[in-house]
Image (cartoon, rainbow, N blue to C red):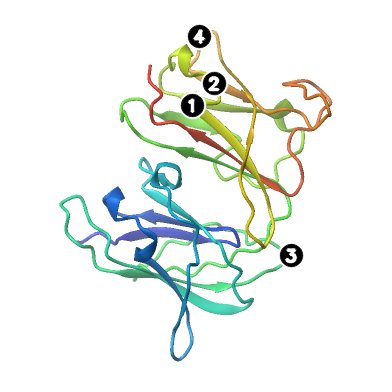
Amino acid sequence: MALFLIDQAKVNVYSVSIKFGRTVKVTSLKNENFKVYKDVATPILISAPFDTIDTIKDYNQISRTLTLYWRITLDNNQDYYIDVFNLLDASGSVVTSEKVTFTYVTSATPSTEDYKTPILSPVLIQDKSIKTDIDISYQVLAKNPKFYIDSVDPGNGSFYIENNFNNGRAIIIFNERPASNFLNNRYFVVQRKKIQKTPSRWENLTTNVSMHSWKPEVYIDFPSLDATPSYFADNKDYFEKGYKYRITVSKDIGI
């Protein structure tokens, strides 16, 4: 049985995440291959709906997940679909085009599920509302398949974490201990962005990066929100309401 191009998808007011069901060539992940249409009697093409794709940052080769970031605001309660076409598989052949259909809804109450897996077709319907609190995610770029991230805390894609979560510490557990020379903000890039309908930019955060004395655990300590930031201290707030956070782990990290 042939594999679907799109295994799962998630659409929200900030981004579109597409998890591919088969290997695709990174070079074919171009903006022109992801077109958005207003789903009306005569479909209307939406001009330049996404930020320019940066495959180094936006494509997770381990999970085969691509994240597209909206640069426009869609109409509320309107049906849309994303046409995904001209992607190449591992052999260089063009994969049959598929669509992600959704209804854009802005609501005060978030949807309770992030993904809905297609049953009889690769088309997914997913509504996602505005989030007004913290959204934290991780992006892992693969270089050595024998060296990988085993787990993270908070979990990938966690929403609404407490402002003082774990004293501002995120924990990334690898299958092996990474070399100590990678423990800095060059290889662990930490950013945050304000959650709003209009486009906003990611801003870099200076964090403390350290590792357990013998376990393969890397600690990312966020700065507190004080005028003079503290790191991993009690009774401090570290995650500001109305922002989303992400940690990008470089593909160049090794053991």
- Give the residue at x 73% y 37%: 239
Under mark 1, the amino acid is Tyr
Q: How many neighbours does mark 4 have within 10 angstroms: few (below 14), some (14-19), or many (20 or more)?
A: few
Q: Which residue is mark 3?
A: 108
**Disc 3 or 1, which lies upstream in sequence?**
3
Asked whether the beta carbons under mark 4 and mark 2 sit within 8 Å of each other, the answer is no
Under mark 2, the amino acid is Asn
Q: Is residue 7 above or below residue 42?
A: above
Q: Nearer the viewer, residue 200 or 239?
A: 200
Picture coordinates of residue 55, whole percent (x, y): 39, 47
Q: Is residue 45 above or below residue 138?
A: below
Asked whether the beta carbons under mark 2 and mark 3 sit within 8 Å of each other, the answer is no
Q: Which residue is mark 2?
A: 184
- Give the residue at x 74% y 65%: 108
Gap between marks 3 and 4 measured at Cα: 45 Å
Secondary structure at badge 1 equals loop
Q: Nearer the viewer, residue 244 or 70?
A: 70
Q: How many neighbours does mark 3 have within 10 angstroms: few (below 14), some (14-19), or many (20 or more)?
A: few
Q: How many neighbours does mark 2 have within 10 angstroms: few (below 14), some (14-19), or many (20 or more)?
A: some
The label on residue 124 is none
The label on residue 214 is 4
- Give the residue at x 36% y 35%: 142
Picture coordinates of residue 114, whole percent (x, y): 54, 57
Under mark 4, the amino acid is Trp
Gap between marks 1 and 2 measured at Cα: 6 Å
The label on residue 187 is 1
- Quadrant of the image occupied by residue 229: top right
Tell me the mark number nearer the camera, choosing from 2 and 3: 2
- Give the residue at x 45% y 91%: 41
**Disc 1 or 4, which lies upstream in sequence?**
1
